[in-house]
Image (spheres, rainbow, N blue to C red):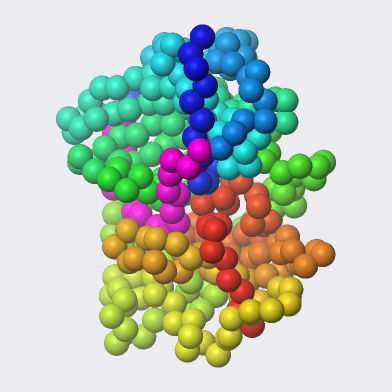
Amino acid sequence: MKTLFFKKISIVSAIVAIVIITGVLVGCQKEEVIISQDSEYLSLSNPSLEISDFKNWFNSQKIANKFIGKPNWDNAEIKIMQDGNSSMVSIEIYKGKNLSGNDSIRELHVTYVKKGFTGGVKIYSYNDKENACVKYYSLNGQLLEEGAYYAPKQIYSLLQRYTFEGSQVRLKSGNEDPCDGTQMYNNSATPYYLPNGAPNPNAYNCHAYVWGYLSSNDPCYLSTHPYWNNCPNISGSGYSQVTSGSPQVGDRWVSYGNVSGWGYTAVHSAIVKEVKNGYVTKVEAKCGDGAIYIYNPDCNVFGAYKTNDVRYYR
């Protein structure tokens, strides 16, 4: 049996998926939502968990007919999830070329949380040596999520989250799932590009939703996307950072982190909608060029938006 190899991953996807197609993913539009991976080591609360446990669960599942690649369990490793208790097996199951002649890589992921397993496949289709489009599929072939990946810095950008079936991976203790009660505003998505491939001049993102648009004189202003705001002027907004006391409904919720090409900056902005026992349990935000949601920041579906540096403004 392979020795357990323990790593921490900074942000955890709720469900990963299986690929049933070999088509090329092109034209990924990167958002400011990031997931970075590091190599900080953690201990595993359940050291008896072995590769065979993941393998047995996987073998009991109904797999899409066009599953590509046979898992090589000898090369599998157990990674520790963000909470330090849950774990995930990651295995490369296929590596070839896409129609552009670049690498196409598929990884099987099986996650163990709360004495239960869930899993699927993540596919990377590289546009060049550094950038890949990413798709997540469920084990029965349902598309769950699309994103972009910048290999040199291991940065993942979440572009679109789709409706998914089945149970979600839970990293919180207790009986309450933080994803329960998530609400989406109908018809609120504003795709970055129109169906004909032209820029959508009406597209806007989280910072525009919370802090407003940029003036045409701003260095960050995009003439192709006049309502898109990558450089929110928080200091000039009239809001001040909350440095003491608990957050309140109506406060602005902002996460900070390193963004490729922008440095250390505001990653995501939201409006606080609910506070329980001094802890923010609901925010409202525009998710990239996707829809407007009301959600719990601890819901793993929106995990890419929450960094280790969250600040409040009032």
Residue 8, percent from left and from top: 51, 39
In-image side of 101 versus 120 (left or right): left
Taking the spot 48% from the left edge, 13% from the top edge, the residue there is 2
Tell me: residue 46, above or below residue 182.
above
Query: Where does the magenta region start and end?
Result: 23-41
Q: Residue at x 24, y 43 (%)?
A: 130
Residue 254 visible, this orientation: yes
Does 27 appear in magenta? yes
In percent of width and height, residue 205 lies at: 46, 66
Which residue is painted at 20% across and 41% down in the image?
128
Q: Find residue 231 and report its horizontal and vertical position in percent.
A: 39, 75
- Where's residue 23, x and y in %? 31, 29
Res. 52 image quadrant: top right
Task: Residue at 51% x, 51% y: name it.
Answer: 304
- Quadrant containing the C terminus is bottom right
Q: How many marks?
A: 0
Q: Is residue 34 above or below residue 310?
A: above
Residue 18 shows in this picture: no
